[in-house]
Image (cartoon, helix red, strand yellow):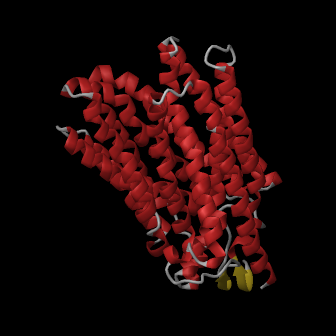
Amino acid sequence: MQTSDTLEIQSFIDTRPMSSRQWMLTALCFAIVFCDGMDVAVMGFLAPAIIEQWDISRAGFGLVMAAAPIGLALGAIFAGSSSDYLGRRKVLLASVFAFGVMTWLTALARTPTDMALLRFATGLGLGAAMPNTTTLLSEYVPQRSRSFILAAMFTGFNLGSAIIGFIAAFMLPRWGWQSVLHFGAAIPLALWLVMLFALPESARFMVVRGRPMPAVGRVLGRVIGADLGGVSRFALAEEKLAARQPVAALFTRPFALRTFALWVCYFMGLLVIYLTTSWLPTMIRDAGLPVDRAANVTAMFQLGGTAGAILVGLAMDRFGATRSIALAYLLGGGALILLGMGGLQTALLALTVGLVGFCMSGGQTGLNAYAPTCYPTAMRATGVSWMLGVGRLGSILGSSIGGVLLGFGWDFTTIFCVLAVPAALAAAAITVSGIGRGAGQRAVASA
């Protein structure tokens, strides 16, 4: 039995090996992110079949395609941050249930307007999932391996995005596009039933919200695998808030610098990633190369990104988070210049695209793992969700600006060499955020 008057939660977690329930929580969060990736990507695979069946233009279907990303950004900002009030468990359960039900209802849509509204509602649920899986898991894993575990969790998003493509290829010709949406809804709804019984609340959140200490001990002890009946008080060694409201606290002196730096970094990273993945296939086809080559080359970006996420996560735990992420973005900028200068006809095109994905997606996933460490428990979900929501504007800009630049006559070389600039800005921003975070940690240590 653990006997002590006071137990600091993170220090206690750091002294122990990962328990089976901590690994189960990791698997649950991976599964949530997997479902998130499936749902985000599914409409891209279904769009041609829906456009053909409804006999509408691609431009007319554009509203449907844009609805989920907009809902996702708003969901991240508002629904994501609500867990600092309601709890990680409640918001995650509501999020997964919402996007599962809305995906099922999307299969019943009969007009583009109906489908767009349902996809917007789906996006609201999706937006709340990512920041809360990140926050909850970060509050239960040891610091020594936190970055790697969170980065590994985030690979579920890429895996889900890829798997739904294979599912769509199998189901579409047999049962139609509605069947794919039914499948995409059934998986998160089944996961919701598992979460209902297996997903714990954050013990750190319970302390912040003043829950009874015996209840905190039961939840923490069950997850960690320890008897904490002898502990009378649980404590958190972290920065204090200068404002009562978590959103207001983001802009107070201790946190404002790192908040804006994280926003800039996430925005710039998504700008590069979405412009590359959205417009590279079109540039390859416009250069006269076959469609299958365009698909295979672009797939190398995702493969490189998955490997990069794992290795950047390992580097963060060993060499430091900001240093590893900044280096990934800087190397990504160099790889973008190499891609632009090499052109589309080089035999190394696929390898270079894979290198860009390795660095840029690796850095972006590392940023997702790093962000929760920048904020104390009382505002952690708010800080992460606002970074994800504001940063999503970069994905919207990246998805749209490629066509504008091509319309201006920019060639492949110019576009990808210029993209090295936002990659360098992302590296600078993560370095600045590390300065603010380091000052906060020194203040806690000296208190």
Residue ID at (49%, 66%): 88
Say which of 2 and 432 sits in front.
Answer: 432
Classify residue 150 as left or right of residue 33. Answer: right
Q: Position of residue 221 (x, y in %)?
A: 63, 71
Q: In this orientation, does residue 124 appear? A: yes
Q: Where is residue 83 in the image (x, y as percent from the top left)?
A: 47, 69
The quadrant of the picture occupied by the N terminus is: bottom right
Q: Position of residue 315 (x, y in %)?
A: 78, 48
The quadrant of the picture occupied by the C terminus is: bottom right
Res 352 quadrant in image: top right
Classify residue 173 as left or right of residue 420. Answer: left
Location of residue 22 with respect to 36 vertically, above or below: below
Classify residue 277 as left or right of residue 18. Answer: left
Report the number of numbered marks. 0
Residue ID at (42%, 66%): 90
Say which of 212 and 300 sits in front.
Answer: 300
Q: Position of residue 294 (x, y in %)?
A: 52, 19
Location of residue 366 with respect to 202 vertically, above or below: above
Res 223 quadrant in image: bottom right
Say which of 442 and 154 sits in front.
Answer: 442
Classify residue 214 as left or right of residue 189. Answer: right
- In the orientation shown, which residue stands out farthest toward the left? 110
Q: In this orientation, does residue 146 appear? A: no
Residue ID at (56%, 26%): 299
- In the orientation shown, which residue stands out farthest toward the front? 408
Residue ID at (66%, 77%): 228
